[in-house]
C-alpha cells in the first residue's frame, strides 16, 4: 500500500481487492499501517467479554487481533469474497451499508481503512450505529484527507506486476463528525498521526460512542 502521485489507473474497490487478495497480508505490512494500528489500539478497551464486529475486515487483520485479545465473540464482514477467503472463519459476505445483524448486537465495532472506499459514508455510519449497544464504541480509521490534497493515492501492486490505485473518497474530521452526530454517535477520541515528527498526518483515527 504505497503512496504515489496521481496518474495510475484507478480501480473500483471490488475490482482492486479481487486482484490484491492473493498477496494481501493479515497483518500491518508497511509503516503507514503500523502507525494506523498503533493509533487505533490506543483507543481499544479491554476486549475480554465483549462482542466485536470488524466492518470491512479484509484479510482479517483486526479480526484476528480481537480474537487474540479475548473478545467473547469476534466476527467480520467484507464485500470482497476473495479477501474473506484469506480471513477465514467467523466472517460473512456483506456490505457496510447492509450489515446482517440485529440492532444492538455488539459492544465494539472496528472499521479500519475501509470506509474511504464509499462515495457516501452516511449509510455505513448509520448501520454501524444501529448495531452498537448503548455506550458501545466504534473505532474507525481512514487515510488522512491531507494526503489526498497533497496528490497521494492508495495503491497496490498486482500479481501481474502492474501498480493500480484504489478508489478513495477523502473526508475531513468535520465531514465525519457531522454525519456521526446525525446517526447518534458522539465523537470521544481523535488521532492524526504522522510518519515523522512535524510531518503531515497520514492517518485519521476516530473513536465514537453510541449515545444511550
Image (cartoon, helix red, strand yellow):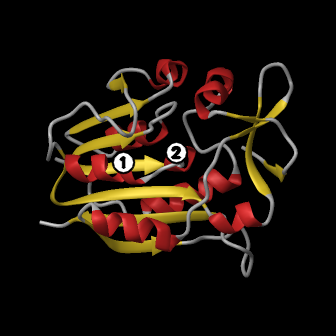
Residue at 68% of width from left, 22% of height from top? 19
Q: Distance from label 1 to label 2 (Cα)?
A: 10 Å
**Image point 41% across, 36% down: which residue?**
64
Classed neighbour count for the residue bearing mark 2: other residues with Cα under 10 Å, few (<14), some (14–19), many (≥20): some
- In primary-sequence order, the first of circles 1 and 2 is 2
Q: Which mark is residue 64?
A: none
Total marks placed: 2
- Judging depth in this view, the residue of 125 and 72 nearest the camera is 125
Secondary structure category for the residue under label 2: loop
Asked if residue 77 is positioned above or below residue 182 in the image, the reply reads: above
Local secondary structure at mark 1: helix
**Quadrant location of residue 21?**
top right
Out of 114 and 35, give the one closest to the viewer. Answer: 114
| Residue 109: percent from left, percent from top | 31, 49
Residue 137: x and y in percent read 27, 59
Is residue 144 rendered to the left or right of residue 37?
right
Q: Residues within 10 Å of mark 1 (few under 14, many from 20)?
A: some
> Which quadrant holds the N terminus?
top right
Q: Position of residue 92 (x, y in %)?
A: 35, 24
State left or right for residue 34 relative to residue 111. Answer: right
User: Which quarter of the rendering shows the C terminus?
Assistant: bottom left
181 is higher (above) or lower (below) than 80: below
Residue 67 x, y percent position in the rendering: 33, 38
28 displayed left or right of 42 = right
Residue ID at (46%, 26%): 87
Please give the residue where the numbered disc 1 appears in the rendered image.
Answer: 123
Q: Which residue is mark 2?
A: 118
Q: Are marks 1 and 2 in contact (CB under 8 Å)?
A: yes
Amino acid at each position: 500500500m504505497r503512496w504515489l502521485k496521481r496518474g495510475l489507473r484507478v480501480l473500483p474497490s471490488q475490482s482492486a481487492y479481487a486482484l490484491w487478495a492473493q498477496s494481501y497480508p493479515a497483518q500491518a505490512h508497511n509503516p503507514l499501517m503500523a502507525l494506523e494500528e498503533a493509533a487505533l489500539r490506543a483507543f481499544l478497551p479491554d476486549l475480554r467479554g465483549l462482542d466485536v464486529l470488524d466492518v470491512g475486515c479484509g484479510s482479517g487483520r483486526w479480526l484476528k487481533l480481537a480474537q487474540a485479545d479475548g473478545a467473547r465473540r469476534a466476527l467480520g464482514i467484507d464485500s470482497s469474497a476473495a479477501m474473506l477467503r484469506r480471513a477465514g472463519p467467523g466472517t460473512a459476505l456483506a456490505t457496510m451499508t447492509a450489515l446482517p445483524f440485529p440492532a444492538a448486537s455488539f459492544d465494539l465495532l472496528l472499521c479500519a481503512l475501509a470506509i474511504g472506499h464509499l462515495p457516501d459514508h452516511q449509510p455505513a455510519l448509520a448501520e454501524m450505529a444501529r448495531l452498537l449497544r448503548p455506550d458501545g464504541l466504534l473505532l474507525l480509521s481512514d487515510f488522512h484527507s491531507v494526503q489526498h490534497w497533497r496528490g497521494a493515492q492508495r495503491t497496490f501492486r498486482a500479481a501481474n506486476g502492474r501498480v493500480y490505485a484504489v478508489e478513495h473518497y477523502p473526508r475531513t474530521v468535520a465531514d465525519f463528525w457531522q454525519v456521526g452526530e446525525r446517526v447518534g454517535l458522539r465523537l470521544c477520541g481523535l488521532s492524526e498521526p504522522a510518519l515523522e515528527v512535524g510531518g503531515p498526518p497520514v492517518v485519521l483515527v476516530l473513536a465514537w460512542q453510541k449515545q444511550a
